[in-house]
Amino acid sequence: MAEARVPQKSLPKINKVDQAFWEGAANGKFLLQKCKSCAKIQFFPRVACVDCFGELDWIESKGTGKVHTFTLVRVPRNPAFKDETPIYYINVILDEGVIVESRLVGDTKEKVKMGDRVKAVFQETHDPKIKLPCFELA
Amino acid sequence: MRRKKVCFVGYGSTEYSRNSEASALSYYADAIRAALKQTGLNKKEIRGFSITTQASPDYSPHVAEQLGLEVDWVLNGDYGGAGGVMSVRRAADAIECGHIDLAVLVGGNSFDRSTPTQRQLEYQRGNFVDVFGYGGPNSLMALIQRLHMEQYGTTLEQIGKIAIAQRFNAINNPQALFRKAMTMQDYLNSRMISDPVRLFDCVMPCSGAECVLLASEEKAKQITDKPVYLVTDAEISHYQVANMLPDKTTFGQKVVGERIFKEIKHEDIDLLEIYDDYPIAVMIQIEDLGFCKKGDGGKFVDAHDLTYQGDFPVNTGGGELSVGQAGLAGGYLHIVEALRQLRGEADGHQVKKAERALVTGIGWLNYGRNLGTTAALVMERGK
């Protein structure tokens, strides 16, 4: 029999590909990858440019953008999030031109509409070394 | 590309159960047994085997070993919900090349907790999606549905009509877990899961398995007087992958449709078995495959009767929405239902003119875009 476990809120399992991103987030920076060859900007972190397979640099996003689409999650996949429902799960188009999946937080989130301006905020977690890049209405 | 000499020669299904803890392997065996019984084949004649599942952790050769299959061709059809169609494509290639003349392709699932299941390998989902408390596929499809409604004026009633028609189709399908008629009020009032996705937009996870037998034309003639020919098939994985601002409401089925309908006309399709993890996914595929313009899916649904008695029969046995989703058997359910229809064996939900069917598969919702794998095939009743 599996032992009963109290569900934990998920945290990223940081690896060599995305380590720089999470270090940035811990310092309040939203990092994106930029191709050294073709200058394409991409997210999530990968090992090569999705367009030309070039090598990558990290750049800092302004952390601003607009709501592309959103949903109010009533049934989170991980039950540990149940006490925070509804979770405002969003796709943001950053001003640098990439879609980011994230969560809308803050007191005004109930007013969200498609196209609303948002800015990144970095939420503390139960691991002091990890902050999650969420968004608030700007 | 047009296929020449590959036939579906039989199929097998198990009962679906919401709580069975029988092993996934026993479900695969039951589905294969049913297909062998239907065709009178001896298991030793099967020289090709493909498995599509997340319910058993072993590599495909180990599953073949468990089932006692000595084979010349073995495949792990790990393409998510497109696993059925894409495994058929691989097997058809092997048959055309002459490597094998008969393959059994299986998809299945069970809630057996005594064996571990396959690990999710999608690290970006763990690190960049899970951490925000997302709601699984329900919330990822909800993002797409909201966009479709905003961009094209698609209504909940238009989306609901798909779920309701499929439920009507399931009423006389003994395999379906849900056989009670659904009204528009039932649909609209069903519990919100991840706005705008409601409970009746979602599939019921269950235990079960499906399998199909694919053979060379020559072998098919020895096995059955009801061969069903694979006419044409196509797939694309990671459509728009390099586009950081992808069109979330257009799936890879747009490319697949262009390839399929080079070989056949839309009006030659008598029925459609469209992968239906959600009704909105059915509507988007109808658009992408070119049955109507992008964004006109709602109007198209309004203008047509999608039941098995209608002018545009879709998911004639109820689809995954009414039958249940036995994990990755979901991608096989549509192939098996198409075979029932084309062989005239869909008792109680038989489409009158059923000569050609289009079957689709779509697999996993990915980061920021929509589907990872998209595929379709056309099959035709032998003359």
Image (cartoon, coloured by chain):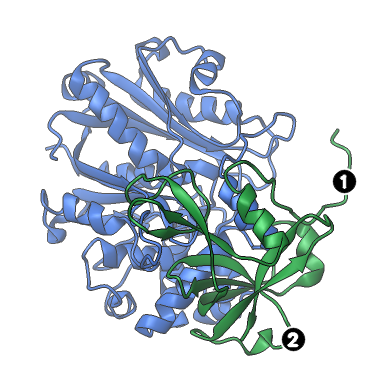
Chain colours: A green, B blue
**Secondary structure found at label 2:** loop
**Coordinates of residue B192 in the picture (x, y in percent):** 63, 75
Q: Residue at x 38, y 63 (%)?
A: B282
Q: Can you say which quadrant of the picture contains the C terminus of chain B?
A: top left
Q: Is residue B339 above or below residue B62?
A: below
Instruction: Give the percent coordinates (x, y) of residue A72.
Output: 63, 75
- Residue labelled with disc 2: A107
Secondary structure at badge 1 equals loop
The tally of labels here is 2
Q: CA distance from mark 2 to mark 1?
A: 32 Å
- Tags 2 and 1 both on a single chain: yes
Q: Is residue B227 left or right of residue A101?
A: left
Identify the amino acid type marked 1: Arg
Q: Is residue B279 visible to us here?
A: yes
Residue B269 at x, y percent in the picture? 19, 56
Disc 1 designates what residue?
A: A5
Q: Is residue B253 above or below residue B300?
A: above
- Select label 2 or label 1 by which is in front: 2
